[in-house]
């Protein structure tokens, strides 16, 4: 039983249990991601060191921690965690956290911070061709299918190629032939192919 006259009115046994059950803080050494070779980085994050440095330069103002604590994640590490989530088949947050040695909550925050930072830079990199205002483009798509707010269509296609002599495995697609994946965005009014059914 605790005594009210003592400075620390907690039983000795309780103090011993608290010390025994207290989890020690484990501080992992900071990993220099950019010290790895490009083939390792491309396999893990789908970007080379030079590309990661470029992303870090443009995203750092939006994602860097404003703290004087020495154990926060670097902006490069935050970007790499998000890249791994974006490009590695949408793995579970736990799996990415285990691979990067961070918690699920840290992965979630990194993905959110990088996504919001990319949203800030959206209009610096995504520019629609042509002179038509987006209002007219939306109206044109709405007339076709009755679907509001559409400003473009995107489609991809695999263009077959002869197997290159360098990095041949990088050009094998999911159907096991060599190709280059091409994507096209069209803000123009889409014409319906013959026999296509109208939506709505």
Image: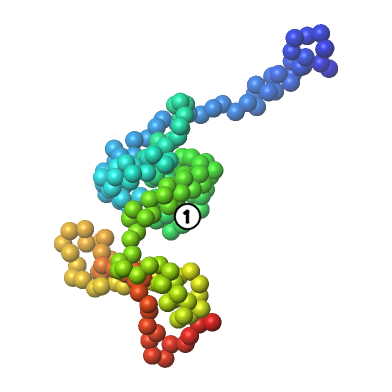
Residue at the farthest left position: 165
Asked whether residue 150 appears in the rendered view, the answer is yes
Would you identify the image quadrant in which residue 178 lies?
bottom left
Residue at image point 37% right, 44% down: 59
Residue at image point 44% right, 71% down: 138
Q: Say if 8 sits above or below 98 in the image.
A: above
Residue at the farthest bottom position: 195
For label 1, the SS is loop
Residue at image point 21% right, 58% down: 167
Residue at image point 65% right, 27% down: 21
Relative to 102, is 188 on the left or the right? Answer: left
Mark 1, other Cα within 10 Å: few <14 / some 14–19 / many ≥20: few
Q: How was the colour assigned to the protein in this rendering?
A: rainbow
Between 128 and 71, the residue placed more toward the observer is 128
Q: Say if 193 sits above or below 75 in the image.
A: below
Would you identify the image quadrant in which residue 190 lies?
bottom left
Residue 19 drawn at (x, y percent): 65, 21
* Picture quarter with the C terminus: bottom right
Residue 63 drawn at (x, y percent): 43, 41
Total numbered labels: 1
What residue would you read off at disc 1?
Answer: 91
Asked whether residue 84 appears in the rendered view, the answer is no
Between 108 and 60, the residue placed more toward the observer is 60
Residue 91 drawn at (x, y percent): 47, 55
* Picture quarter with the N terminus: top right
Between 138 and 12, the residue placed more toward the observer is 138
Q: Say if 137 sits above or below 109 in the image.
A: below
């Amino acid at each position: 039983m605790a005594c009210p006259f003592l400075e620390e009115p907690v039983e000795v046994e309780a103090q011993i249990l608290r010390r025994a059950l207290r989890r020690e803080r484990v501080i992992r050494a900071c990993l220099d991601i950019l010290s790895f070779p490009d083939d390792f980085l491309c396999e893990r994050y789908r970007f080379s060191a030079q590309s990661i440095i470029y992303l870090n330069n443009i995203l750092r103002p939006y994602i860097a921690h404003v703290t004087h604590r020495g154990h926060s994640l670097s902006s490069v590490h935050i970007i790499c965690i998000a890249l791994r989530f974006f490009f590695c088949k949408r793995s579970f947050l736990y799996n990415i956290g285990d691979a990067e040695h961070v918690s699920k909550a840290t992965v979630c925050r990194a993905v959110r911070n990088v996504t919001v930072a990319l949203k800030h830079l959206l209009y610096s990199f995504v520019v629609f061709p042509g002179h038509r205002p987006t209002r007219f483009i939306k109206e044109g798509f709405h007339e076709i299918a009755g679907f509001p707010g559409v400003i473009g269509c995107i489609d991809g296609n695999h263009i077959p190629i002869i197997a290159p002599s360098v990095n041949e495995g990088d050009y094998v697609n999911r159907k096991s032939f060599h190709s280059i994946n091409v994507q096209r965005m069209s803000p123009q009014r889409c014409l319906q192919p013959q026999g296509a059914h109208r939506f709505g």
